[in-house]
Amino acid sequence: MSIIVGVYSYYIDGKENSDRHAILNKTLGWIIGITLINFNNWLILIGGLMILTIVLKVKESEWVFLVLINILGIIIMINSKEILSFYLSIEIQSLSTVLLISYKYKKEGKRIEATLKYFFLSGLNSCIILLGLIQIWMNTGLDNWIELEIYLDIEKWETIGFKVLIFGLFFKLGAAPLHYWIVDVYEAAQKWIVKFLATIPKVAVIQFLSMRMMILYAHWNVIYGQTFYWIGMIISLWSSVIGAIQGLNQRNLWRLMGYSTIMNNGFIILGIYCFNWVNNLNNEILTLYMGVYAITIIGIFYILMWYNIEKLEDLLRLNTYREIEKITLTILLFSLIGIPPLLGFFSKALIMVTAIESNMYWFLCWILVTSVISSYYYLRIIEQLTLDNRGWTEFNKFSSLKKGGILKLGKQEKWTIKILMSQIRLKNKYELEVIWLSQILFFTIFGWILI
């Protein structure tokens, strides 16, 4: 496998340049290949290679090196046996992510703002994680995860370090209250970087939480009491509410997808906290949910990036000749909502069933309410995709009346535009009502069956 990664990194970079960057990338490819020892590493590497393939034609080699460094840090984090190597992997990811966000791009002002915001928040997060790790070491004298698991089974000790560490890891997910960086980064950074940050690092954090941290919390209901439970549930509800409410008035699709990510973090954290109530099958459920979510997000981002779609109005470009892309984007959005029989429905349904078996009824109901609210901005995108393009063609005929950047219309032209827009609204009115009724009916029937 190290040969495959090395050859691939040489192909995408060394074929264009034979300089020191190509040598570094090829060497880093060998290192990543050697560290592949389990399925999670393979999954993360394949996802990273998919991201690199999308931007294969970019001739600059610096970003390739930074992405490979980030993937290396992710793999080290998943396979870390000691808390020191875990912290160093977090720092590797943070520094490479800052450089990726600050990579040259046309949105100079917003890029600098997003870079500084992520830099300061990631520095604060590193201090929080380090504080938690130091507290764990001071209480136990151990720095190995396996030894900590054995020690936890036979001793009861102060757990503030683990609580602080969990809180710091939620920053990597973009969960509230450390979520402010994610929306600005989604808007300002290069889109292939956004696609990478929205999938691979998040999958890695979920895998680490389910593989390492939740094993250490195997007896949390006896040792930890209700504090750990309420911290997780408050963060889950906070993330779902912020993602659902603040995304309603967004017309920039990249910021909207950022709030969608925050809202989905509520489901993810709820699934994580169901771990100790049911069984180890929860790890597979989280893997399925993150896999479906990553595929859906990559598909949506690919369409938005390929057709240079920034705002809601830019979706009209897909209306005339891009029927396949329009249908694909609609299906992916329905999957994010959770409409059966799409994969998004089954992944969310499994987490809901696990939450019900864990007696988390009130939290599940609240997250379902926020999911219904957030489905509004998904449906608004679908509404824009189903607009009658002929009406906009007639509207664009008046562009010849522009003088000095000001559109001057007479009474007749204004009434014509009003009639065209009313026809568009009437045409899509009943379609949206059917979508809303089916969504409400789905949640009503499914909730009644489960309860």
Image (cartoon, helix red, strand yellow):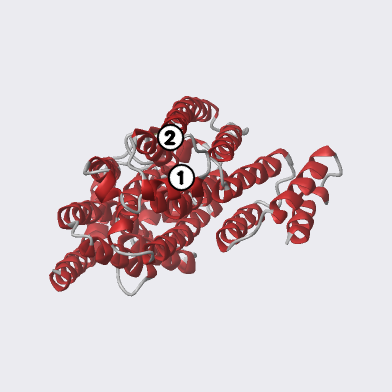
Give the image location of residue 423, x and y in percent: 24, 60
Give the labeled residue for mark 1: 148
* Residue pictured at 79% horizontal, 46% vertical: 27
The crowding category of the residue bearing disc 2, from other C-alpha atoms within 10 Å (few below 14, some 14 to 19, many at least 20), is: many
Judged from this view, the residue extending furthest toward the front is 154
Give the labeled residue for mark 2: 136
**Which sits earlier in the primary sequence, circle 2 or circle 1?**
2
* Residue pictured at 45% horizontal, 56% vertical: 297
Judged left or right of residue 423, residue 317 is right
The N terminus sits in image quarter:
bottom right
* Residue closer to the observer: 402 or 7: 7
Q: Is disc 2 in contact with disc 1, using a CB cutoff of under 8 Å?
A: yes
Give the image location of residue 89, x and y in percent: 58, 39
Image: 450 above or below 394:
below
Label 2 to label 1: alpha-carbon separation: 9 Å
Q: Amino acid under label 2?
A: Ile
* Residue closer to the observer: 115 or 322: 115
Judged left or right of residue 96, residue 286 is left
Give the image location of residue 170, x and y in percent: 39, 41
* Residue pictured at 36% horizontal, 71% vertical: 342
